[in-house]
Structure formats: structure tokens, C-alpha cells
Amino acid sequence: MQPPEGVAAGSAGAAPDSPASWPFALLVPAAGAGIRMGGVRKPFLELRGRSVLDWALAPFLERPDLAEVVVALGAPPNRRLPALQDARVRITSGGSNRFESVANAFDHLESGAGLIAVHDAARPFPPRAAIDACLRVAGDGVGAVAGIPAVDTVKRTGARGVIVETPSRETLWYAQTPQVFPRDLFARAIELCRMVDGPPTDDASMVERLGAEVRMVQASTTNLKITSREDLAVAEVLVAKGLAG
């Protein structure tokens, strides 16, 4: 059975007065070149009259426990984006890959927020319940990753695409964002990754390299990532039908 949206896997959920009320800082990697979108950077794409980035930041900016946001951009936007006018939001330069963008954003934090959240700029619909749950879990001293249980059969292959294993779906999740971590844990993970070869594929994998605990938190299938024109079309439909945003 899947946990309800916003509840950590293996957990009955946390009380409303848990450390989710701690101030948190949000890092937003947004430096992709937009090659698959005709050169238009995904955060700047228009979605029902607003940029994808405006949609992505909105559920965070409405929270009183948000201390600051650092957006790592590859290039400045070509128009005024409302989300970037919030006093808590600042822009810094992105890197050549996701890890470099996240690390640079972390280095430019000004607040002493005890929790660090990372959210993809190209995910316009982060579920509010999942944000709450990730903050609660991270407030208990472990990492938290929004995601959904795998519904497709996944194959692991070797050379020439030969299948070598079919893992059980019962133990597999699709990782999304936000991903939230205690600040000291996240800082140590960044330092470790700077010393080893190969950038991590997501923020949780950085923390996993430390051997630290990271838990999955149920999110939603509407928490899609815009990587193609088809994804953008799906997002348009979700907003039009009132299923997201």
C-alpha cells in the first residue's frame, strides 16, 4: 500500500508542531541550456501566463518559515519575473552541471537557516503537502526526498542492452524534488562531493555518500519536470483542469 501524499515512507507522519516550523533556505538550480526546448531555458517558459519558475517558487514563497531563496541561473531572464522580485529571493550564477549550481547557490546563502531544501526550477507544481512532510522529516535530522512509488517494471541492463536484473517494484521510487536536509549534513555532503570524481545525479545521492539516512516522502504524479514540449503541454492541461498549481 502506498502512503498518502505528504507522508514519509515507513512513517505514520509527524505532529503539526514538529521541527517543520524551523526556518529553511531554498536552493533552485536553474542553469540548464534549454537545448531540448529550442534554446529557451525551461524556467523561463510561459505556462498559462506565468513562467515555469514563478509556478515552481509560488508554494515556497507563501510559507512564513522560508528564510531565503537562491536561484542559480545560467543567464538572466529576458523579462521581469514576479517571483524574483520577492525580497527573500536572490540570483547567483549556475555551474556546468546540477551539482555545481547547487553548491554555488549553497555558498551564497546569507541566512543561518537550519534546513536546506532543493527544488528543480523545471518542476512547476511541487505539492504543498509533500513540502510540509519533507521539512518535518528533515527536522528530525535525516534527509527527505519527495517522490512517487514506481508503477512501471524497471530493467537493469548490461552490455548491448542485455537485461541482467528485474528489481521488484515494491522497493523502487521515482525521485522528484523538493529534497530537504539538515544544513550541517548537506554542507558535509557538498564537501565530500567536491573531493571525489563524478557529480551526483541528485542531492540525495550526495548525502547517501556520507552513509546518512535519507527517506522517501510521497508526492504526486502532477509534480512533473518540464523537459520537453510534450511535458509543457501536459502541464497546461493540468492547470486548465484545476489539477495542479
Image: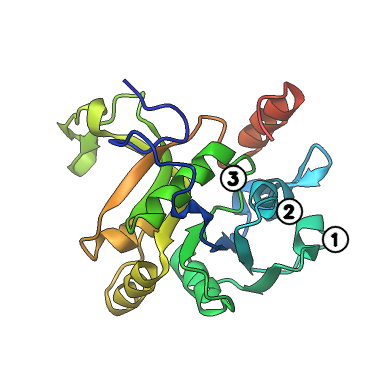
Which residue is identified by label 3?
A: 123
Q: Nearer the viewer, mark 1 or mark 3?
A: 3
Q: Looking at numbered disc 2 in the image, what kind of residue is underneath it?
A: Phe
Quadrant of the drawing holding the C terminus:
top right
**Residue 79 disc label:** 1
Outermost residue, left side: 164
Quadrant of the drawing holding the N terminus:
top left
Element at badge 2? helix
Q: Earlier in the sequence, mark 3 or mark 2?
A: 2
Crowd tier of the residue under label 2, counting other residues whose Cα lies within 10 Å: few below 14, some 14–19, many 20 or above: many
Q: Nearer the viewer, mark 3 or mark 2?
A: 3
**Residue 44 disc label:** 2
Element at badge 3? loop
Q: Earlier in the sequence, mark 1 or mark 3?
A: 1
Disc 1/disc 3 C-alpha distance (Å)? 20 Å
Percent x, y for residue 244?
Answer: 66, 31
Q: Tags 1 and 3 in contact by the CB under 8 Å rule?
A: no
Q: Tags 2 and 1 in contact by the CB under 8 Å rule?
A: yes
User: Taking 205 as reference, is 147 above or below it?
Assistant: above
**Residue 15 disc label:** none
Q: Looking at numbered disc 3 in the image, what kind of residue is underneath it?
A: Arg
Q: Tags 3 and 2 in contact by the CB under 8 Å rule?
A: no
Percent x, y for residue 91?
Answer: 68, 71
